[in-house]
Amino acid sequence: MPPDRSVTDAPNSNARLRPLWLVAAYVFLALGVVGVVLPGLPTVPFVLLASYCAARGSRKLHDWLRGHPRFGKMICEWEEHGAVSRRAKWLASTMMLLCSVLMWLTPSPFWAWAMGSAIMLCVAVWLWFRPELPPPEK
């Protein structure tokens, strides 16, 4: 089994860049927290980006994110397997559909609705092609 990678041997983690990775981690984490209450701002991608940056800037923050009761499991599944749970896929797809409908109902240009919906459709297709972890054996 390969040794556990520390912050110091992660790619792009030299001492000069570590403060920038740490700042980026906190910015993405803040955006993820805001996304919990603000519709249209995604939480999960920002939390995953925060974890990615924290792995290069702060071992302590990265470990805290991986152990977080709400996001830890999702982060570990993504980092170790590139996996997304079926529940998360359904939730994300439903929210993107809801956003598309809301954009359609608001007085915005057709091209804005079409472009936004096309991007969300591409994200949904990509998301459904991500692997899922098998259910835990009993």
Image: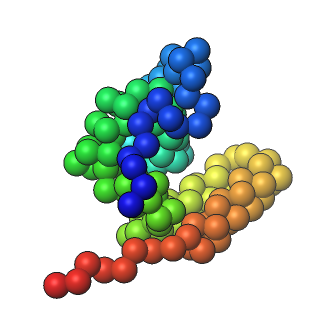
Quick check: 31 above or below 131? above
Name the one closer to the observer, 123 or 94.
Answer: 123
Q: Quadrant of the N terminus?
A: bottom left
Q: In x, y percent, where is residue 19?
A: 51, 16
Q: In x, y percent, where is residue 11?
A: 59, 37
Quick check: 48 above or below 117? above
Image quarter of residue 32: top left
Q: Quadrant of the C terminus?
A: bottom left
Quick check: 60 above or below 98? above
| Residue found at the far bottom of this picture | 138
- Residue 23 visible? The answer is yes
Residue name at image x 70 percent, y 64 percent: 122
Q: In x, y percent, where is residue 72?
A: 31, 49
Name the one closer to the observer, 127 or 77.
Answer: 77
Residue name at image x 58 percent, y 15 percent: 16
Residue name at image x 29 percent, y 36 percent: 64
Query: From the viewer's perspective, is 95 left or right of 62?
Result: right
